[in-house]
Image (cartoon, rainbow, N blue to C red):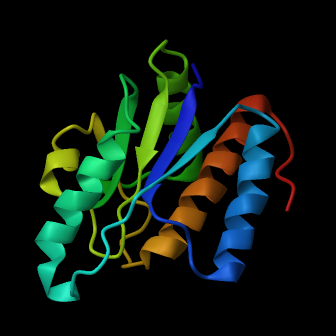
């Protein structure tokens, strides 16, 4: 079982952000195996159907979740600095369950998946696009692993 998993709906459409995701995933995988699950995103619905979109995407993302410690990114979540996040991640990864980070799509995360969360995490008090949030999460996971392993943060 992989100890680290990232789940989000759909592929990142912005090529530059997609390149950054791949860059940080490669760096993360130098330290830990990490699965990226790009669940099926809701399509064909207008933005005004945000609740329906979040529910469909939550159901699709749940298919990728097992018994991991589930961390949902949310504006209602706890903020941490990088050192605290490194300690948090190390503690959760030391369990046999592994850790799954769940990032919502453009509409956010539905209540059904937020209720499954073991922890809510906020990466910023600012509102970030869902695609930028993905990059920020991956960069912080990479930074946390360098802190844990006592390695120099390589840019």
Residue 134, placed above or below residue 97: below
**Side (left or right) of 6 relative to 109:** right
The percent coordinates of residue 112 (x first, y second) are 15, 48
**Could you say where residue 31 lies in the image, as x and y percent from the top left?**
77, 34
Residue at 73% of width from left, 44% of height from top? 28
Position of 144 relative to 78 (above/below): above
Between residues 51 and 121, which one lies in front from this camera angle?
A: 51
Q: Is residue 124 above or below residue 79?
A: below
Taking the spot 73% from the left edge, 56% from the top edge, the residue there is 24
Q: Residue at x 44, y 44 (%)?
A: 101
Q: Is residue 76 visible?
A: no
Residue 30 picture quarter: top right
Camera-side residue of 30 and 43: 43
Residue 147, position as x, y percentages in the image: 71, 39
- Drawn side of residue 15 relative to residue 77, left or right: right
| Side of 58 relative to 127 (left or right) | left
User: Which image quarter holds the N terminus?
Assistant: top right
Q: Nearer the viewer, residue 9 or 128?
A: 9
């Amino acid at each position: 079982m992989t100890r680290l998993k990232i789940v989000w709906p759909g592929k990142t459409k912005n090529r530059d952000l997609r390149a950054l995701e791949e860059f940080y995933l490669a760096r993360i995988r130098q330290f830990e195996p990490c699965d990226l699950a790009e669940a099926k995103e809701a399509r064909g619905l207008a933005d005004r159907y945000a609740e329906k979109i979040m529910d469909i995407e939550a159901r699709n993302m749940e298919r990728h979740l097992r018994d991991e410690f589930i961390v949902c990114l949310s504006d209602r979540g706890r903020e941490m600095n990088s050192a605290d996040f490194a300690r948090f991640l190390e503690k959760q990864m030391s369990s046999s369950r592994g850790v799954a980070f769940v990032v919502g799509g453009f509409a956010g995360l539905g209540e059904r998946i937020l209720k499954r969360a073991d922890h809510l995490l906020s990466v910023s008090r600012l509102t970030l696009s869902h695609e930028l949030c993905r990059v920020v999460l991956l960069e912080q996971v990479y930074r946390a692993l360098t802190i844990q392993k006592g390695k120099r943060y390589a840019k």
